[in-house]
Amino acid sequence: MTKPQKHRFRAAAALVAVGAALLGASAPAAAQSLFASRGLGYVNPPVDGRALALGGVALGLPGGGLSLVNPAAIAAYPAPAISFAFQPDFYDSTLPGDAAEGSTARFPLLHAVFPFRTRWTFSAAFGSYLDQNWAVERTDTLRLPGRSVGFTDRFASRGGVTRLRLGTAYSVTERLSVGVAGDLYSGGARDTLSRRFERPDTVVPGRVDLLPAAFAGEWSYRGVGGSVGVRWVASDALNLGAAVTMGGTLEARPAQDSAGVPAGKEYALPLTFDVGASGRVAPRAVVALGAQWAGWSAADADLAE
Protein backbone atom coordinates (compact mmCIF):
# COMPACT_ATOMS: atom_id res chain seq x y z
CA MET A 1 0.00 0.00 0.00
CA THR A 2 1.45 3.37 -1.02
CA LYS A 3 1.61 6.35 1.29
CA PRO A 4 -1.33 8.28 -0.35
CA GLN A 5 -3.44 5.13 -0.16
CA LYS A 6 -2.63 4.79 3.56
CA HIS A 7 -3.77 8.36 4.16
CA ARG A 8 -7.03 7.74 2.30
CA PHE A 9 -7.62 4.54 4.25
CA ARG A 10 -7.03 6.33 7.56
CA ALA A 11 -9.38 9.17 6.57
CA ALA A 12 -12.10 6.69 5.58
CA ALA A 13 -11.66 4.76 8.81
CA ALA A 14 -11.91 7.95 10.85
CA LEU A 15 -15.11 9.02 9.10
CA VAL A 16 -16.67 5.59 9.58
CA ALA A 17 -15.75 5.68 13.28
CA VAL A 18 -17.32 9.12 13.70
CA GLY A 19 -20.49 7.95 11.93
CA ALA A 20 -20.72 4.86 14.11
CA ALA A 21 -20.28 6.96 17.26
CA LEU A 22 -23.06 9.34 16.19
CA LEU A 23 -25.41 6.46 15.45
CA GLY A 24 -24.60 4.78 18.73
CA ALA A 25 -25.25 7.95 20.70
CA SER A 26 -28.54 8.77 18.99
CA ALA A 27 -31.81 7.99 20.74
CA PRO A 28 -34.80 6.40 18.97
CA ALA A 29 -37.36 8.91 17.74
CA ALA A 30 -40.20 7.43 19.80
CA ALA A 31 -42.04 10.76 19.89
CA GLN A 32 -42.55 10.84 16.12
CA SER A 33 -46.05 9.90 15.02
CA LEU A 34 -48.78 10.66 12.53
CA PHE A 35 -49.51 13.75 14.62
CA ALA A 36 -46.03 15.24 14.13
CA SER A 37 -45.73 18.96 14.95
CA ARG A 38 -48.90 18.64 17.05
CA GLY A 39 -51.42 19.29 14.32
CA LEU A 40 -49.54 20.92 11.45
CA GLY A 41 -48.65 17.57 9.91
CA TYR A 42 -45.80 15.24 9.12
CA VAL A 43 -42.72 17.16 7.98
CA ASN A 44 -41.83 15.77 4.55
CA PRO A 45 -38.59 17.28 3.18
CA PRO A 46 -38.57 17.99 -0.59
CA VAL A 47 -35.45 16.02 -1.53
CA ASP A 48 -34.56 13.93 -4.58
CA GLY A 49 -33.87 10.21 -4.63
CA ARG A 50 -30.12 10.54 -4.19
CA ALA A 51 -30.43 12.66 -1.06
CA LEU A 52 -33.07 10.34 0.40
CA ALA A 53 -30.87 7.30 -0.26
CA LEU A 54 -28.06 9.04 1.63
CA GLY A 55 -30.20 9.44 4.73
CA GLY A 56 -31.39 12.93 3.84
CA VAL A 57 -27.99 14.50 3.08
CA ALA A 58 -28.83 17.01 0.35
CA LEU A 59 -25.95 19.53 0.57
CA GLY A 60 -22.34 19.35 -0.48
CA LEU A 61 -22.84 16.47 -2.91
CA PRO A 62 -20.68 16.05 -6.03
CA GLY A 63 -22.33 17.62 -9.05
CA GLY A 64 -24.81 19.69 -7.07
CA GLY A 65 -28.37 18.52 -6.49
CA LEU A 66 -32.01 19.21 -7.27
CA SER A 67 -33.38 18.96 -3.73
CA LEU A 68 -35.12 22.08 -2.40
CA VAL A 69 -32.62 22.57 0.41
CA ASN A 70 -29.72 24.60 -1.03
CA PRO A 71 -30.70 27.04 -3.81
CA ALA A 72 -27.02 27.36 -4.79
CA ALA A 73 -26.72 23.66 -5.74
CA ILE A 74 -28.39 24.18 -9.14
CA ALA A 75 -25.37 26.18 -10.34
CA ALA A 76 -23.59 22.86 -11.02
CA TYR A 77 -25.89 22.04 -13.96
CA PRO A 78 -24.54 23.18 -17.35
CA ALA A 79 -27.72 22.14 -19.21
CA PRO A 80 -31.47 22.19 -18.49
CA ALA A 81 -32.56 19.44 -16.12
CA ILE A 82 -35.71 18.19 -14.44
CA SER A 83 -36.26 15.90 -11.46
CA PHE A 84 -39.38 14.13 -10.25
CA ALA A 85 -39.61 12.12 -7.01
CA PHE A 86 -42.23 9.60 -5.86
CA GLN A 87 -42.23 8.33 -2.28
CA PRO A 88 -44.35 5.36 -1.11
CA ASP A 89 -44.69 5.15 2.65
CA PHE A 90 -45.85 2.34 4.94
CA TYR A 91 -46.50 3.32 8.53
CA ASP A 92 -47.88 2.10 11.85
CA SER A 93 -49.11 4.19 14.75
CA THR A 94 -49.64 3.29 18.40
CA LEU A 95 -51.89 5.14 20.84
CA PRO A 96 -52.90 4.17 24.37
CA GLY A 97 -55.02 1.09 23.84
CA ASP A 98 -55.10 1.42 20.04
CA ALA A 99 -52.89 0.69 17.06
CA ALA A 100 -53.19 1.52 13.37
CA GLU A 101 -51.27 0.84 10.21
CA GLY A 102 -51.56 1.87 6.60
CA SER A 103 -49.81 3.18 3.52
CA THR A 104 -49.73 6.33 1.47
CA ALA A 105 -47.81 7.88 -1.41
CA ARG A 106 -46.20 11.30 -1.55
CA PHE A 107 -44.73 13.40 -4.34
CA PRO A 108 -42.02 15.33 -2.53
CA LEU A 109 -40.39 17.01 -5.50
CA LEU A 110 -40.79 18.33 -9.04
CA HIS A 111 -37.87 20.59 -9.97
CA ALA A 112 -36.73 22.12 -13.26
CA VAL A 113 -33.55 24.18 -13.78
CA PHE A 114 -32.60 26.44 -16.69
CA PRO A 115 -28.99 27.70 -17.12
CA PHE A 116 -28.65 31.20 -18.58
CA ARG A 117 -25.37 32.11 -20.23
CA THR A 118 -22.36 31.06 -18.18
CA ARG A 119 -22.97 32.24 -14.62
CA TRP A 120 -26.73 32.28 -13.97
CA THR A 121 -29.09 29.37 -13.36
CA PHE A 122 -32.82 29.70 -12.73
CA SER A 123 -35.22 27.17 -11.28
CA ALA A 124 -38.93 26.51 -10.77
CA ALA A 125 -40.07 23.82 -8.37
CA PHE A 126 -43.00 22.25 -6.57
CA GLY A 127 -42.20 20.45 -3.34
CA SER A 128 -43.83 18.94 -0.28
CA TYR A 129 -43.65 20.45 3.18
CA LEU A 130 -46.31 19.22 5.63
CA ASP A 131 -48.31 16.04 5.03
CA GLN A 132 -51.69 15.61 6.73
CA ASN A 133 -52.91 12.35 5.19
CA TRP A 134 -53.76 9.81 7.88
CA ALA A 135 -56.69 8.13 9.62
CA VAL A 136 -57.31 6.46 13.00
CA GLU A 137 -60.20 4.16 14.00
CA ARG A 138 -61.40 3.09 17.43
CA THR A 139 -64.09 0.55 18.28
CA ASP A 140 -66.07 0.42 21.51
CA THR A 141 -69.48 -0.46 22.93
CA LEU A 142 -72.25 1.93 23.91
CA ARG A 143 -74.35 0.57 26.79
CA LEU A 144 -78.00 1.62 26.69
CA PRO A 145 -80.97 0.55 28.83
CA GLY A 146 -81.73 -3.01 27.84
CA ARG A 147 -79.05 -3.41 25.19
CA SER A 148 -75.46 -2.73 24.12
CA VAL A 149 -74.50 -1.37 20.70
CA GLY A 150 -71.04 -1.54 19.18
CA PHE A 151 -69.70 1.46 17.30
CA THR A 152 -66.61 2.61 15.41
CA ASP A 153 -65.16 6.11 15.59
CA ARG A 154 -62.98 7.27 12.70
CA PHE A 155 -60.86 10.42 12.66
CA ALA A 156 -59.39 11.11 9.22
CA SER A 157 -57.38 13.92 7.70
CA ARG A 158 -56.68 14.56 4.03
CA GLY A 159 -54.45 17.29 2.63
CA GLY A 160 -51.27 19.12 3.52
CA VAL A 161 -49.04 22.07 2.79
CA THR A 162 -46.81 22.33 -0.28
CA ARG A 163 -44.33 24.92 -1.46
CA LEU A 164 -43.93 26.61 -4.83
CA ARG A 165 -40.38 27.86 -5.35
CA LEU A 166 -38.65 30.21 -7.75
CA GLY A 167 -34.89 30.43 -7.35
CA THR A 168 -31.67 31.52 -8.94
CA ALA A 169 -27.99 30.72 -8.47
CA TYR A 170 -24.94 32.71 -9.48
CA SER A 171 -21.50 31.19 -10.09
CA VAL A 172 -19.01 33.58 -8.53
CA THR A 173 -16.16 31.36 -9.72
CA GLU A 174 -15.95 27.86 -11.14
CA ARG A 175 -15.84 26.49 -7.59
CA LEU A 176 -18.01 28.94 -5.62
CA SER A 177 -21.71 29.66 -6.16
CA VAL A 178 -24.45 31.38 -4.19
CA GLY A 179 -28.21 31.08 -4.49
CA VAL A 180 -31.47 32.59 -3.32
CA ALA A 181 -35.06 31.34 -3.58
CA GLY A 182 -38.54 32.46 -2.64
CA ASP A 183 -41.22 30.05 -1.41
CA LEU A 184 -44.99 30.30 -1.53
CA TYR A 185 -46.67 27.90 0.89
CA SER A 186 -50.12 26.75 -0.09
CA GLY A 187 -52.52 23.92 0.63
CA GLY A 188 -55.53 22.74 2.56
CA ALA A 189 -56.81 19.96 4.76
CA ARG A 190 -60.16 18.35 5.52
CA ASP A 191 -60.66 16.73 8.94
CA THR A 192 -63.54 14.31 9.41
CA LEU A 193 -64.84 12.75 12.63
CA SER A 194 -67.51 10.09 12.17
CA ARG A 195 -69.28 7.43 14.23
CA ARG A 196 -71.12 4.43 12.81
CA PHE A 197 -73.08 1.85 14.78
CA GLU A 198 -73.29 -1.88 14.24
CA ARG A 199 -76.58 -3.14 12.91
CA PRO A 200 -78.55 -5.14 15.49
CA ASP A 201 -79.04 -8.85 14.95
CA THR A 202 -82.77 -8.54 15.50
CA VAL A 203 -85.15 -5.67 14.71
CA VAL A 204 -87.55 -4.74 17.52
CA PRO A 205 -90.83 -3.12 16.32
CA GLY A 206 -91.19 0.47 17.43
CA ARG A 207 -87.52 0.92 18.33
CA VAL A 208 -85.55 3.61 16.52
CA ASP A 209 -82.04 2.53 15.56
CA LEU A 210 -79.10 4.78 16.26
CA LEU A 211 -78.07 6.80 13.23
CA PRO A 212 -74.47 7.43 12.13
CA ALA A 213 -73.05 10.92 12.52
CA ALA A 214 -70.19 12.81 10.93
CA PHE A 215 -68.57 16.21 11.38
CA ALA A 216 -66.07 17.79 9.01
CA GLY A 217 -63.89 20.86 9.00
CA GLU A 218 -61.86 22.35 6.15
CA TRP A 219 -58.77 24.52 6.42
CA SER A 220 -56.74 26.42 3.85
CA TYR A 221 -53.11 27.46 4.29
CA ARG A 222 -51.06 30.37 2.92
CA GLY A 223 -47.59 31.66 3.68
CA VAL A 224 -44.33 32.93 2.22
CA GLY A 225 -40.70 32.10 2.97
CA GLY A 226 -37.23 32.25 1.53
CA SER A 227 -33.89 30.51 1.42
CA VAL A 228 -30.25 31.44 0.78
CA GLY A 229 -27.36 29.08 0.26
CA VAL A 230 -23.77 28.64 -0.79
CA ARG A 231 -21.89 25.82 -2.54
CA TRP A 232 -18.11 25.52 -2.53
CA VAL A 233 -16.03 22.94 -4.35
CA ALA A 234 -12.94 23.15 -2.17
CA SER A 235 -11.07 20.58 -4.28
CA ASP A 236 -11.78 17.82 -6.76
CA ALA A 237 -12.36 15.50 -3.79
CA LEU A 238 -14.20 17.82 -1.36
CA ASN A 239 -17.60 19.57 -1.70
CA LEU A 240 -19.20 21.80 0.92
CA GLY A 241 -22.62 23.40 1.19
CA ALA A 242 -24.72 25.44 3.61
CA ALA A 243 -28.21 26.95 3.52
CA VAL A 244 -30.58 28.97 5.70
CA THR A 245 -34.36 28.82 5.26
CA MET A 246 -36.70 31.42 6.73
CA GLY A 247 -40.13 29.85 7.10
CA GLY A 248 -42.04 33.03 7.88
CA THR A 249 -45.65 32.70 9.01
CA LEU A 250 -48.19 30.10 7.94
CA GLU A 251 -51.76 31.43 7.94
CA ALA A 252 -54.53 28.88 8.46
CA ARG A 253 -58.15 29.76 7.75
CA PRO A 254 -61.22 27.55 8.21
CA ALA A 255 -63.81 27.45 5.48
CA GLN A 256 -66.34 28.90 7.92
CA ASP A 257 -66.75 28.83 11.68
CA SER A 258 -69.87 27.94 13.61
CA ALA A 259 -71.13 31.54 13.64
CA GLY A 260 -70.59 31.98 9.92
CA VAL A 261 -67.79 34.53 10.36
CA PRO A 262 -64.38 33.70 8.86
CA ALA A 263 -61.66 33.22 11.44
CA GLY A 264 -58.02 32.22 11.23
CA LYS A 265 -54.84 31.31 12.99
CA GLU A 266 -51.17 32.01 12.33
CA TYR A 267 -48.24 29.68 13.02
CA ALA A 268 -44.59 30.69 13.11
CA LEU A 269 -42.63 28.39 10.79
CA PRO A 270 -39.10 27.44 11.85
CA LEU A 271 -35.81 29.00 10.94
CA THR A 272 -33.75 26.11 9.51
CA PHE A 273 -29.98 25.71 9.11
CA ASP A 274 -28.52 22.98 6.88
CA VAL A 275 -24.88 22.03 6.30
CA GLY A 276 -23.37 19.19 4.31
CA ALA A 277 -20.12 17.91 2.92
CA SER A 278 -18.87 15.03 0.80
CA GLY A 279 -15.36 13.73 0.31
CA ARG A 280 -13.93 11.20 -2.09
CA VAL A 281 -11.91 8.76 0.02
CA ALA A 282 -11.25 6.26 -2.78
CA PRO A 283 -11.66 6.21 -6.57
CA ARG A 284 -15.08 4.56 -6.14
CA ALA A 285 -16.07 5.67 -2.63
CA VAL A 286 -17.56 8.97 -1.43
CA VAL A 287 -18.46 9.78 2.16
CA ALA A 288 -21.31 12.29 2.70
CA LEU A 289 -22.20 13.99 5.99
CA GLY A 290 -25.01 16.38 6.76
CA ALA A 291 -26.72 18.11 9.67
CA GLN A 292 -29.87 20.19 10.16
CA TRP A 293 -31.27 22.37 12.93
CA ALA A 294 -34.91 23.48 12.72
CA GLY A 295 -36.43 25.77 15.34
CA TRP A 296 -39.91 24.27 15.57
CA SER A 297 -40.15 25.62 19.12
CA ALA A 298 -41.13 28.93 17.49
CA ALA A 299 -44.57 27.42 16.90
CA ASP A 300 -45.00 26.11 20.45
CA ALA A 301 -47.16 28.98 21.69
CA ASP A 302 -49.34 28.97 18.57
CA LEU A 303 -49.89 25.20 18.71
CA ALA A 304 -50.54 25.16 22.46
CA GLU A 305 -53.52 27.46 22.02
Image (cartoon, helix red, strand yellow):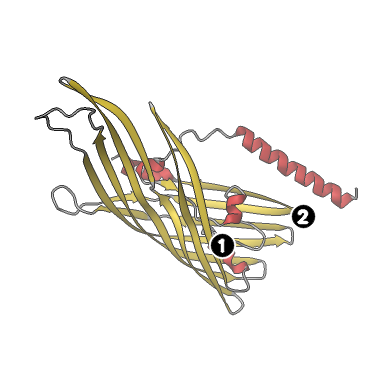
**206 is higher (above) or lower (below) than 115:** above
The part of the image, by quadrant, that contains residue 143 is: top left
Residue 40, horizontal then vertical, whole percent = 36, 46
Front residue (pair 252, 240): 252
x and y, in percent, of residue 73 in the image: 58, 63
Is residue 58 something one can see in this rendering?
no
Q: Secondary structure at mark 1?
A: loop
Q: Which residue is at a point 36% across and 41% down the rendered structure image?
A: 135
Q: Is 26 left or right of 132, judged from the image as shown?
A: right
Q: Which residue reaches farthest right?
A: 1
Question: Secondary structure beneath disc 2?
Answer: loop
Give 206 or 224, whichever is nearer the viewer: 206
Q: Residues within 10 Å of mark 1 (few under 14, many from 20)?
A: many
* Residue pictured at 37% horizontal, 45% vertical: 299
What residue sits right under mark 2 in the picture?
A: 284
Do tag 2 and tag 1 residues touch (Cβ < 8 Å)?
A: no
Q: Amino acid at mark 1?
A: Leu
* The furthest residue to the left: 206
Q: Residue at x 51, y 56 (%)?
A: 86
**Which residue is disc 1 drawn over?**
66
Give percent across and percent down for residue 162: 41, 57
Q: Can see residue 265?
A: yes
Left or right, 228 with respect to 249, comes to right
Which disc is residue 205 wearing?
A: none
Question: Disc 2 or 1, which lies upstream in sequence?
Answer: 1
Specify the quadrant of the image occupied by residue 199.
Answer: top left
Q: Can you say which quadrant of the picture contains the C terminus?
A: top left
Total numbered badges shown on the rendered structure:
2
Q: Residues within 10 Å of mark 2 (few under 14, many from 20)?
A: few
The image quadrant of residue 65 is: bottom right
Q: Residue furthest top?
A: 146
Residue 233, horizontal then vertical, whole percent: 68, 62
